[in-house]
Image: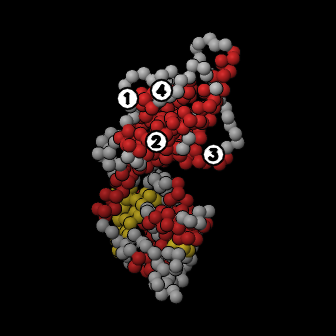
């Protein structure tokens, strides 16, 4: 390294392209260029792109069918299914809201198809009338993040009449500090009732949030219907 | 959602981002894994990308985060993989200076790997990705001035780290 000169402030600025002119010759900077300067060939990126396209194809539904069911004790029920299973469910909310959200979320235009949604509609209808305790339905969680999926898969094991807290679910997932993240994942559950996010309560035993139907009131009603141990109203535990 | 379709967006930036991730991770395989994960994350987030946002900066941001968490995972399970890439010098050199250069390359490579993520990312984006400090700051979540300072920090550290070896 005999030819190496001291690198001044100006040399560094020139080298970074922040000031005009050529920087001094430097073995160090040349080494850096040798290590970092090489660019991938176009076809190398092409291989990654091909894998990404394939994963995206598998990662997203390419069709969405929906149907609406009236006259449940909880109001209008809307269900959307893909080629793989139930994609979304909405209870007691307007159809327009459901379709708008569905369209934005999937990038697809939902088509009404009572035949394809009938099985899910029948089971959820029976559940809402108190005539069914569990579901035999595949769900399509492909559009969720891996963490959201893990949370929903984890709480699917909760049977009617059972409850857990956000903190417990976090601990089951091996992330004891993540109660809040669990709560957020549950708040975005696209298939409530089928994946029973209403069975997860705040860590102090109070009800916690619910975004379906009439909010926490619907959550409480579902839990009462299932005969779950009733949650304490917030602040009343002591 | 952005004006440009997602497919087109990833085609436009795949090569550039693969280069960026190689420089950040120091490994071809890690870079490919990171790019794949970054694009899939981007795909999920794409519907909420604002139309007025800069998709290039957005993709760099995601790629940087993926590389950062990938690097932390890799660091935890690394068993000293000091594999120096083969030299590709065209010039004929004496065996002695070649060995010396190989040694320097390996030392600089190790140095780059130990740089804090933000400094390495700023340096790479500026010198090798040709990005301006506005965009680099956006990617790193800081001001353009702080982005510039990070790139310089990396170089000053390099200078200081090798000061003795180089002058001896």
Say whether residue A225 is left or right of residue A106: right
Q: Nearer the viewer, mark 2 or mark 4?
A: 2
Crowding at dot 2, Cα within 10 Å, few <14 / some 14-19 / many 20+, comes out as many
Q: Give the alpha-carbon distance from disc 2 to disc 1, as whole Å.
A: 17 Å
Q: Nearer the viewer, mark 3 or mark 4?
A: 3
Quarter of the image for residue B30 reads top right
Q: Nearer the viewer, mark 1 or mark 4?
A: 1
Task: Give x and y (percent) for residue A10.
Answer: 42, 29
Residue A206 or residue B151, whichever sits in front: B151
Quarter of the image for residue A20 reads top left
Q: Give the alpha-carbon distance from disc 1 to disc 4, as whole Å.
A: 31 Å
Q: Give the alpha-carbon distance from disc 2 to disc 4, as whole Å.
A: 30 Å
The residue labelled by disc 4 is A42
Q: Give the alpha-carbon distance from disc 3 to disc 2, as whole Å.
A: 22 Å
Residue B103 or residue A115, whichever sits in front: B103
Task: Give x and y (percent) for residue A96.
Answer: 29, 62
Task: Give x and y (percent) for residue A162.
Answer: 56, 77
Residue shown at the point (51%, 86%) measured from the top left: A237
Asked if residue A180 is positioned above or below residue A100 in the image, the reply reads below
Q: Chain of mark 2?
A: B
Q: Secondary structure at mark 4?
A: helix
Q: Secondary structure at mark 2?
A: helix
Residue shown at the point (40%, 79%) measured from the top left: A217
Q: State whether discs 2 and 4 lie on one chain.
A: no
Q: Secondary structure at mark 1?
A: loop
Q: Which mark is residue B75?
A: 3
The residue labelled by disc 1 is A19
Task: Examine the rendering and report whether any part of residue A107 can be seen.
Answer: no
Residue B4 or residue A109, whichever sits in front: B4
Residue shown at the point (69%, 15%) measured from the top left: B95
The residue labelled by disc 2 is B150
Residue shown at the point (62%, 31%) measured from the top left: B164
């Amino acid at each position: 390294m005999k030819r190496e000169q001291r690198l001044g402030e100006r040399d560094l600025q020139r080298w970074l392209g922040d000031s005009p002119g050529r920087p001094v010759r430097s073995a160090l900077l040349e080494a850096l260029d040798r290590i970092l300067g090489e660019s991938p060939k176009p076809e190398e990126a092409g291989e990654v792109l091909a894998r990404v396209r394939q994963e995206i194809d598998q990662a997203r539904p390419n069709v969405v069918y929906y149907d609406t069911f009236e006259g449940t004790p909880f109001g209008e029920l809307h269900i959307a299914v893909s080629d793989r299973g139930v994609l979304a469910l909405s209870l007691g909310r307007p159809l327009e809201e459901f379709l708008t959200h569905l369209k934005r979320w999937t990038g697809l235009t939902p088509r009404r198809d009572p035949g394809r949604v009938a099985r899910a509609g029948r089971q959820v209808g029976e559940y809402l009338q108190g005539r069914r305790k569990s579901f035999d339905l595949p769900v399509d969680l492909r559009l969720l993040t891996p963490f959201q999926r893990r949370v929903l898969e984890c709480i699917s094991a909760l049977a009617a009449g059972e409850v857990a807290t956000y903190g417990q679910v976090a601990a089951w997932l091996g992330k004891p500090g993540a109660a809040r993240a669990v709560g957020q994942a549950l708040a975005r559950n696209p298939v409530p009732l089928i994946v029973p996010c209403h069975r997860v309560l705040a860590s102090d035993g109070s009800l916690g949030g619910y975004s379906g139907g009439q909010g926490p009131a619907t959550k409480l009603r579902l839990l009462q219907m299932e005969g779950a141990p009733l949650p304490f109203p917030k602040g009343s535990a002591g | 959602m952005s004006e440009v379709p997602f497919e087109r967006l990833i085609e436009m930036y795949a090569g550039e981002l693969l280069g960026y991730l190689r420089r950040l991770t120091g490994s071809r395989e890690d870079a490919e894994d990171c790019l794949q994960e970054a694009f899939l994350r981007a795909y999920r987030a794409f519907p909420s990308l604002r139309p007025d946002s800069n998709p290039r900066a957005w993709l760099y941001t995601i790629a940087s985060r993926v590389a950062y968490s990938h690097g932390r995972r890799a660091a935890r399970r690394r068993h000293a993989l000091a594999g120096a890439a083969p030299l590709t010098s065209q010039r004929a050199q004496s065996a002695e200076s070649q060995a010396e250069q190989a040694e320097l390359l390996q030392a600089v490579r190790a140095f780059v790997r130990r740089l804090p993520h933000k400094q390495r990312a700023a340096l790479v984006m500026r010198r090798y990705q040709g990005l301006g400090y506005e965009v680099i700051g956006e990617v790193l979540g800081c001001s353009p001035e702080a982005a510039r300072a990070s790139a310089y920090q990396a170089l000053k550290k390099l200078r200081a780290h090798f000061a003795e070896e180089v002058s001896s």
